[in-house]
Amino acid sequence: MSWQEYIDVSLVGTHHIDKAAIISAAGDSVWAASPGFTISPDEMKALVPVIGGDDDKINKAYGEGIYVAGERYVVFRVVEGVRPGHRSVYARMGKKGLVLANTTKAVLVAHYGEDQVAQNATKVTEDLAEYLTKLGS
């Protein structure tokens, strides 16, 4: 499956996510994205240390929020994954929100809308991250 297919089928295709992107773990490129969901180079560079576990960047994200596709989201939780080095970041803006989950080589950035359930978006995103990690991706 291509990176774009993971977006179209495994994330947006579930109807629990309305738009998403997959970026490199280095934060230097977008591998796939929903149409119109553009994450800038500066936004990617700011997200990677947060999902990577940099305590100073996590604390800054809690205080200042994170920016994705030009919008500011309030970070309310950062959770360590079952494997060392893997974690999820949860952020929201009103009833909309983001779930970020890292794999070995990528970061999934999933957005859910006002009519979608945050817990469902979280499960879909984290399940895909787990699957891709098992593949070594």
Image (cartoon, rainbow, N blue to C red):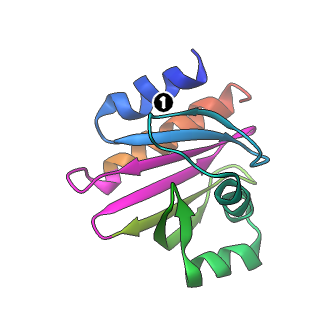
Mark 1, residues whose alpha carbon is within 10 Å: few (<14), some, or many (≥20)? many
In depth, the one of 41 and 63 nearer the eye is 41
Q: Seen in the image, is 24 located left or right of residue 64?
A: right
Q: How many labels does the image show?
A: 1
Expressed as whole percent of the image width and height from the top left, the position of residue 21 reads 54, 40
Q: Among all residues in the image, which is located at the extreme left?
A: 115
Magenta residues, as a range?
A: 94-119
Considering only vertical position in the picture, is 73 above or below 114? below
Image quarter where the N terminus lies is top right
Q: Seen in the image, is 51 located left or right of residue 108?
A: right
Q: In the image, what residue occupies the spot 71% across and 30% down? A: 137
Name the residue carrying label 1.
Answer: 7
Considering only vertical position in the picture, is 60 above or below 101? below
Expressed as whole percent of the image width and height from the top left, the position of residue 5 reads 50, 20
Q: In the image, what residue occupies the spot 60% across and 38% down? A: 22
Under mark 1, the amino acid is: Ile
Q: Among all residues in the image, which is located at the extreme top?
A: 1
Query: Is residue 117 highlighted in magenta?
Result: yes
In depth, the one of 87 and 39 nearer the eye is 39
Query: Is residue 124 highlighted in magenta?
Result: no
Considering only vertical position in the picture, is 58 above or below 106? below
Expressed as whole percent of the image width and height from the top left, the position of residue 44 reads 68, 54
Q: In the image, what residue occupies the spot 48% across and 69% down? A: 72
Q: Seen in the image, is 40 located left or right of residue 114?
A: right
Image-quadrant location for residue 50: bottom right
Expressed as whole percent of the image width and height from the top left, the position of residue 79 reads 57, 64
Q: In the image, what residue occupies the spot 42% across and 34% down? A: 11
Image-quadrant location for residue 119: bottom left
Dot 1: element: helix
Considering only vertical position in the picture, is 105 above or below 122? above
In depth, the one of 78 and 43 nearer the eye is 43
